[in-house]
Image: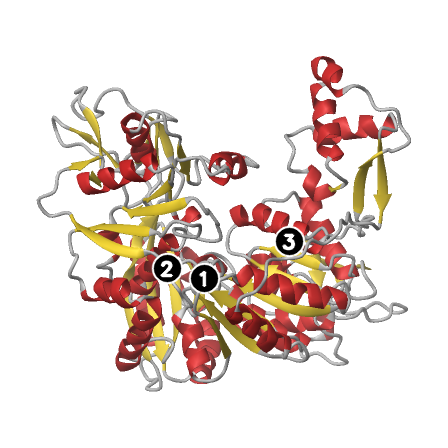
Amino acid sequence: MPVPLNRLFDYSLPAGISAPEPGSRVIVPFANRKRTGWVESSPAHTAVAPDRLLDIERVVDQASLIPTPIWQLLQWCWRYYHHPPGEVISVALPPGLRTGRPLPDLRPRSYFLNPAAELPDLVKLQSRAPRQREILEFLSAGPKTLTQMASLADGWRVVLKKLVEKDWVTVETDVLPSTEAKPGPSLNSDQRAAVAALEGGHDGFKRFLLDGVTGSGKTEVYLQLISKMIARDRQVLVLVPEIGLTPQLVNRFRRRLGIEPVIAHSGLSEGERLQTWSIARQGSAPVIIGTRSAVFIPLARPGLIILDEEHDLSFKQQDRFRYSARDVAVKRARLENIPVILGSATPALESLNNALAGRYSHIQLHKRATGGVLPQWKTIDLKQQSLQEGISQIALHDLEQCLNNGEQALVFLNRRGYAPVLLCHECGWQGDCPRCDSHLTLHRGAAQLLCHRCDFKRPLPDRCPACMALDLRGVGEGTERVADFLTQHFNGYPVIRIDRDSTRRKGAMAKLLEPVKDGRPCILVGTQMLAKGHHFPGLSLAIILNADQSLYSSDFRAMERFAQLLTQVAGRTGRGQTAGLVLVQTYHPDQPQLVRLMNNGYPELARQMLAERQAAELPPFSFHAMLRAESANQQALGSFLRVARKMHDNNNQLSIFGPMPALQARRAGRYREQLLLQSKNRRTLHRFLDGWLNSLASVETSSQVRWIVDVDPQEF
């Protein structure tokens, strides 16, 4: 049942109704209402007394909607992550399958300009029906799927319906658009060796780590393998970390493969997500590209799973059902008996350790596909330097030289907004979130203060709320402030800001990046959205602002994340004819790990960090689970966690730490604390969790506390 209870429920089957298969939907009475549940099994006996059993009221699906390997995967998920089964299924399936409604007609549809119709003059149509002209022009480039049509502005469905009624547009069912596949570039020796090694593992379950430097052509390796899978009539699932990367990847796949990839991510409508799920399940889609939750999409003829940028934290769900798409993908490949490829220029230490231990086949790409060299790194020591909006004079000089040479530059700052704090210069008042232990970020363009943790917002005050003074100042820099300064300083050159605020609308990122793709000299200012998956041949300079914010953190994974991010940002440069230069602004240029990263690269630093983790008995050389709890009542929260810890005291097979405040100790008006469990043995940890979590519901204060277990936590 889709409820937050980690258990199954027994019901009786009325006479004359055959038992539905596992994975079928049924309507049952639950908590004085009718609800949709999923059949887990149909045993002959139950421990529940007959007079307490309620009847299933209606069987929605006699046959399972979920293929056996996916159903087995979901069962593994709710046991491994110790999460309520109904919530696991709710996260894994599109919203349209969470009701008792029969499945609608979900066959793929494509929209074409009618070649037999006499179409109107598009220029004349612009004045009287601009939306009709927009759609006709959109379709003139070739047939489009429903998902492609959804990239248009709101209201396109009504306009499209009129065009179909006029017979200017035709609809074809069970057909996905296709074009002639275009040959890719010639592979270098590293890529050819990688394709040969990966192709040798196309039958049966195998795990590969494709470890290639930035710009080494991992995507082209993927495309070569996908082409071979399509030729064998097998389907391929490609997982990417960000929705923003999906459109450009789809375009590249479409050009190279001559087929229309189906996309799956949370930005789609409910109907689009259900249709994607159905098309993949029917086998109509040769290639599915999606974000984290797409790991659960069923395939009729599974052939290969690819997880690109496998190190990315986006693959770990951070609320509700806290699964790792990377680990679930590996488990799914085992159940489907197919190969899985994890690709990255900066592999996660867990994946690298698996490769070094021989559990994964380690395939490396040591050189860039274009033959270019990796960028040169330099530090800018900020001590005794004068800064303008966080940028040193040295960096500004190099920026000017880059633009004068007709090249492009990237200024990286992983902080959106105008300034992280609004301060009164008279009395020292600061704009703080009333619901979190954090400052409100100043967004000057929107004239508001916004909490980046709970989304609380308030209008930008014109006077200090405490002393009524007028001297309110934004302290610190965000991408909005840096972009404004660079626009004024380099008048005449485009300054393009890429962050969550500037790319919120559909198609915004693609439009913003047009000048970059055209090769015109410009400055990109952005957050980590720019750090992965982008290919900018004209980019020769990267400047990393405020690098020190990640150097000293209480999270033992902070240096790993920092090194991955810096390496990925640096990897955007020098992909064309001009060598790349990376400037790192820091007050600590002699920090040992930063020096090692710059001098020897990520692979050597990663091996050093692995040795340190092993010495400290930290993951991947031990196993963690985090009990995360929150409550509006701080006393009840502390009492609950203290009792939870006492339940462990007699267990000497694992260690427990806490209770301790979360790094964000108060969010959205709720206090947050946690217990960390650690064991050298994974099975020992899970055996303890099985009994311990069942006992927590009986703790007296548990009704006042919202709690969840996070297995293999990635953030503290």
| In the depicted structure, whether residue 537 falls above or below residue 660 | above
* Quarter the C terminus occupies: bottom left
Residue contact at pointers 1 and 3, CB within 8 angstroms: no
**Is residue 597 among the parts visible in the rendering?**
yes
Disc 3 designates what residue?
253
Nearer-N-terminus badge (3/2): 3
Taking the image as shown, residue 631 lies to the left or right of residue 329, namely: left
- How far apart marks 2 and 1 lie (CA) works out to 8 Å
- Residue 419: x %, y % from top left: 27, 35
Of discs 1 and 3, which sits in the foreground? 1
Tell me the crowding category of disc 3: few under 14, some 14 to 19, or many 20 or more residues within 10 angstroms, Cα based: many
Residue contact at pointers 3 and 2, CB within 8 angstroms: no
In which quarter of the view is residue 88 placed? bottom right
Disc 1 designates what residue?
368
Element marked by disc 3: helix
- Residue type indicated by callout 2: Leu
Nearer-N-terminus badge (2/1): 1
Disc 2 designates what residue?
374
Residue at horizontal 54%, vertical 75%? 208
